[in-house]
Image (spheres, rainbow, N blue to C red):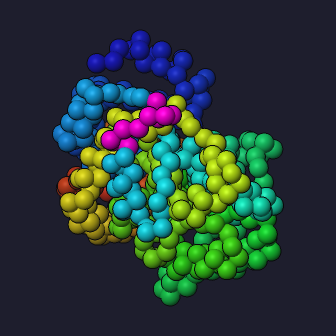
Amino acid sequence: MISQNSLEFDKKHIWHPYSSAVNPNPVYPIESAQGVRLQLSNGATLIDGMSSWWAAIHGYNHPSLNQAIYDQTEKMAHIMFGGLTHEPAISLAQKLIQLSSDSLKKVFFADSGSVAIEVAMKMALQYWSSIGQPKKNKLLTVAGGYHGDTFGAMSVCDPVNGMHQLFSQNLMQHYFADAPYCDEATQRADLNSFTQLIEQHHQQLAAVILEPIVQGAGGMRFYCANYLVQVRALCDQYDVLLILDEIATGFGRTGSYFAYQQANIEADILVLGKALTGGYMTLAATLTSDKIAEGINHNGSGILMHGPTFMANPLACSVANASLDLLATGRWQQQVMQIEKQLSEELNICKGFSSVADVRVKGAIGVVELKQAVDMATIQQQFVDLGVWIRPFNKLIYLMPPYIIEPQELSQLTQAIITVLRNNGEENC
Ligand SMILES: *Cc1c(COP(=O)(O)O)cnc(C)c1O
């Protein structure tokens, strides 16, 4: 049980994500988590609708993930990766190379998604400068994207709605096409603005970067595979690399193992994170092809200038191996399909609410987009009172539960959204 003093200390001294350290919203003390249930300090349990931000796909306190960590702890918790290597990293690289597309053969392990994005951008920039085309040093992306909070990553996040406007003076300038749009009925994709920009600027473009199929933290928008097919074709036509950020979408969330597989395309650089370790530890990976690695090597040195202290941490690699083994049984496919079906059925009613702008579902992701931003502190307390952990942002109330969630537990999540919307009437939500 966390004391009132501890909570006061937290409030006074600790920054939480995207929050004020002076005037913070309340935080809820949590003791433990098991399966899809979070145990609060006051004894209440909440059903988890967030998977700790896309990560905890197998639920919490999973015996085989725990075991992987125990076993590895007794060998070594960490060892520098400079000049040394170990079985958990090798085994994980083998699996990732096997799971992703045929051309991706080189793996860089980073310690967070944002850092893996920085590495992907460096790879692309270093590739072109090494092969004698240093003018190809800009990126093209789409509005509505999110790629992380470090400076390189921020420079390709949505420039208007992104969380990073404050720093616009300090960011590298890149090109932004309109957010991806597909007509739902015909699956026709609108690439007018994207095509214009790539035609106009390809001589300065190192790479295109985007999140395939689902734009996550930038607005929870979905778009069709056909858009990606055409992006790939344009990248090929204009000799621009394609970086796919699967940090949120990877490992089954959208219904396929990787979201880009729905378009049947390949990335030149692929970035993975979040669910890579089943939500246990921080780890990310940037994969690329022999072509890019050899290009980087072209001017002789061949050195990729990056090397985080905790690169390829053995505990993180071990639990990632165990998580990928769980996925290899294939049960996630039925689970995600079932979640998709149930979310569609149960959230559908929200379409009729006057406070709701849109309801959409893709794989194990359900989104209720409101017409107005929510009052976070109020709505958060309402959800907690209903026994669920749902954390909205801005106009978005969304669910992305662990794949192991049972139908009646998922119903508790969807019912909580409906109840909160009904209780709040149209104005406050
Ligand atoms: C979360 C996220 C990132 C950043 O990952 P961190 O581990 O939080 O640094 C990058 N891209 C996408 C698509 C994400 O969802």
| 94 vs 122, nearest the viewer | 94
Q: Position of residue 309 (x, y in %)?
A: 52, 31
Query: Is residue 255 a member of the stretch shown in magenta?
Result: no
Residue 58 located left or right of residue 153 = left
Residue 130 located left or right of residue 415 = right
Residue 19 located left or right of residue 320 = right
| Residue drawn at the location 77% of the way across and 61% of the way down | 132
| Residue drawn at the location 54% of the way across and 26% of the way down | 15
Indicate the quadrant where residue 397 lies: bottom left
* Furthest residue toward bottom: 186
- Residue 73 to residue 410: above or below: above
- Residue 226 to residue 241: above or below: below
Q: Is residue 354 something that shows in the picture? A: no
Magenta residues, start to end: 80-89
Indicate the quadrant where residue 296 lies: bottom right
| 97 vs 200, nearest the viewer | 97
* Furthest residue toward front: 300
Q: Position of residue 139 (x, y in %)?
A: 71, 60
Q: Main secondary structure of the magenta part?
A: loop
- Residue 191 to residue 63: above or below: below
Q: Position of residue 409 (x, y in %)?
A: 22, 52
Q: Is residue 4 something that shows in the picture? A: yes
| 78 vs 1, nearest the viewer | 78
* Furthest residue toward top: 5
Q: Position of residue 311 (x, y in %)?
A: 48, 37
| Residue drawn at the location 60% of the way across and 59% of the way down | 294
**Image quarter of the N terminus:** top left
* Count of numbered badges drawn on the protein: 0
Residue 236 located left or right of residue 269 = right
